[in-house]
Image (tube, helix red, strand yellow):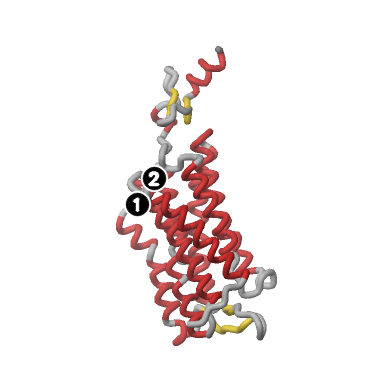
Amino acid sequence: MLFHISDYSLVYLAAAVVTAVAATLAWKRRSVPGGMWLFLLILAAGEWTLADFMDVSSYGLAVKTLWGKISYFGSASIAVFLLLFALEFTHRGKWITRRRILWLMIVPALSWVVAFTNDWHHLLWSNFTYVSASANVLIYAHGPLYWVISVYIYVVALVATWFLIGFALHNRDLYRLQSIGILTATLIPYIGEIVYDFGPGVLPGLDTSAITLTISGIIFTVSLTRWKLLDVMPVAREALVEQLQDGVIVLDTADRVVDLNLAASKLLSEK
């Protein structure tokens, strides 16, 4: 198998390395609520980007399209993992059942089948062309099932985004930073996909997820280290502490204030 390492492929490789670091950090926190879903989300992003790296770097139509098919393991499932993480992170974990997970994974699983059988029906990719005679970049012409799968991915991602936005608006300080970080990290790749789907003239044949997933990986890494994502899990403050007349201040293991209720804020402001 021949390879050609170009500037484009190096961007994909950098994205894969960054997401690998973020996935390692998430794996260490897999036992906390939402931790495993976050790990799978970042892992799917890394698999997607690594497959794109192999696609851009490989020679030969058969090899390149094989990696295009393999990329669907990550790209088609990442939105489902985002939704499952958002449900647990925003205190909706009771909504998650095995049956619902299976229902959510039906379209991703079907997309894998469709991708690996595309040579028979061409419903996912209708045609393949190179950007130019000298470029090693393949343009995938999209068939009807590509758009069906894409709509499903966008809808699931938007539902997850809705939960995270609502949670960020109703929380503050560290918890809000966590929510905003997750929201930003997960939205950026889909903005890149919209550019890829509807603005092919921008970077013909290149899935901009490489650049956007690199940025997302950096944000996830910062969220897991600096903002202590999954180290200090948000709780249902309104139900537990916000309505208390006594002041409540929450400290982390380094004696830093990570949260306080309204009564504590009033007490501190009077001093």
Residues tagged 1 and 2 counted as in contact (Cβ below 8 A) = yes
Residue 121 vs 230, above or below: the answer is below
Residue 110's spot in the image, x, y percent?
A: 40, 72
Which residue position holds label 1? 96
* Residue 92's disc number: 2
Residue 261's spot in the image, x, y percent?
A: 47, 25
Please give the name of the residue rendered at 50% of the width and 50% of the height, measured from the top-left corner: 220
Residue 229, by quadrant, is: top left
Relative to the observer, which residue lies in front, 70 or 125? 70
Residue 37 vs 68, above or below: the answer is above
Quadrant in which the C terminus appears: top right
Of the residues shown, which amino acid type is indicated by label 2? Arg
**SS at circle 1:** loop
Of the residues shown, which amino acid type is indicated by label 1? Ile
Please give the name of the residue rendered at 50% of the width and 80% of the height, measured from the top-left corner: 65
Tell me the CA gap for discs 1 and 2. Answer: 8 Å
Residue 36's spot in the image, x, y percent?
A: 36, 52
Relative to the observer, which residue lies in front, 96 or 18? 18
**SS at circle 2:** loop
